[in-house]
Amino acid sequence: MDVVIAGAAETDEIGVLPGHSTMRLHVEGARNAVADAGLRMTDIDGIASVSAPGPIQVADALGVRPRWIDGTGVGGTSFLLHVRHAVEAIRAGHAATVLVTHGESGKSRVGAARGAFPASSPNAQFEVPYGVTGPPSMFTIPLLRYMKEFGLTAEQLASVAVAQRKWAARNPRARYRDPITVEDVLASRMISYPLHLLECCLVTDGGGALVITSAERARDLPRPPVHILGTGETFESPLISQMADFTTSAAFRRSSAEAFAEAGITHGDVDHLMIYDAFAHVPIYGLEDLGFLPRGEAGAFIAEGHTEPGGRLPMNTNGGGLSYTHTGMYGMFLIQESVRQLRGQAAAQVPGAEISVVQGNGGMFMAAGTLVLSNRRA
């Protein structure tokens, strides 16, 4: 059965929204996506969401009584896994129309859950005592090893933020749109060596939602369907210190290989790419671990402009987590931009985009999800 994304929308606003609770962001994004699909809440019989408030609370707030529920939570890539699970649920007959929601008051913290590691967690026991206490200090561990092994320069790393900002400049909804240079990035405040402020993701409020159903059902709906050609999911380790190799993400490699195989595509078929960019080095790992480039070459590839507007591999075309938005769990916004590109509705539209690959990261290289999406059938 061909399964598609029939509705996709973000909250009315993203950015700093102190008047929006986490639940309000879920509800607003959900209503927008259902309206985008030309449906009513009574048409929804499956729901997926993550974290507080969670799928049951969101469904109740929306007046939805689902017969299928998914509360999988693996950080920022959770929504990619929700899409994958929804595809299988629809094919198995457990649901006909699934709503995937996201809402997060990441900046204003209105109704947001606390993010501290429980004392009994492996992180609190084995990493926190050594100063590895949050995303910047965690993510620098593999980055420093990568720089040592492959000679990635500070200038090449900074060029990731510069490339993202060039896309953001074309997107009226992006949080930051003013042009920046490599020199600007390197002059910004050091957060956790070697990451400067402009190489770290934004902290914002926002949300969004997706409506997933069969292609047959979507035939009568108003929006052009986005076909889900392939999916993948996996994890490596909950502790970044236990990665098998700090210079590559095993989770990225395995989830993407599965998605590409299911979709039956090669790298040359891909017109558009969204790679989670919580920090500037993650797209570098993504380009290599997904197989677009040999090991050690992605930094130079980005610095040479190949992922920027007009480049041969357009990547993170909404401006990414570095310039567009980042609520804490960014994966929903990756999918939203891919849908817009494949519908021909993006603010910075890639001409003729037919196949888009979405690569999500959960935790600090902990988990991964991959989607291969297209505006045509396989």
Image (cartoon, helix red, strand yellow):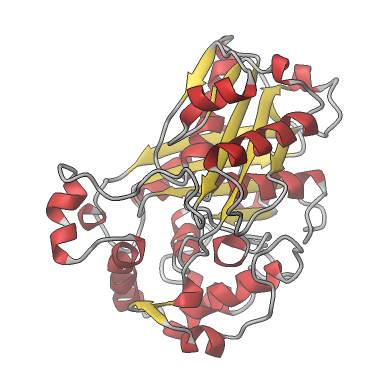
Q: Position of residue 333 (x, y in %)?
A: 61, 49
Residue 367 sits in which quadrant?
top left
Left or right: 224 as drawn, with respect to 245: right
Left or right: 46 as drawn, with respect to 8: left
Task: Please determine whether, in this image, residue 123 is positioned above or below residue 199.
Answer: above
Image quadrant for the C terminus? Answer: top right
What is the number of callouts on the image?
0
Q: Residue at x 55, y 36 (%)?
A: 23
Q: Residue at x 71, y 20 (%)?
A: 41
Task: Please determine whether, in this image, residue 108 is positioned above or below residue 368.
Answer: below
Task: Please determine whether, in this image, residue 19 is positioned above or below residue 71.
Answer: below
Q: Residue at x 14, y 65 (%)?
A: 130
Q: Position of residue 356 (x, y in %)?
A: 66, 47
Left or right: 22 as drawn, with respect to 341: left
Left or right: 201 as drawn, with respect to 151: right
Q: Position of residue 86 (x, y in %)?
A: 56, 24
Q: Is residue 251 visible?
A: yes
Q: Residue at x 60, y 41 (%)?
A: 25
Image quadrant for the N terminus? Answer: top right
Task: Out of 150 and 99, give the one closest to the viewer.
Answer: 99
Q: Is residue 378 visible?
A: no
Q: Position of residue 266 (x, y in %)?
A: 60, 47
Task: Out of 170 and 117, give the one closest to the viewer.
Answer: 117
The residue at the far front in this view is 19
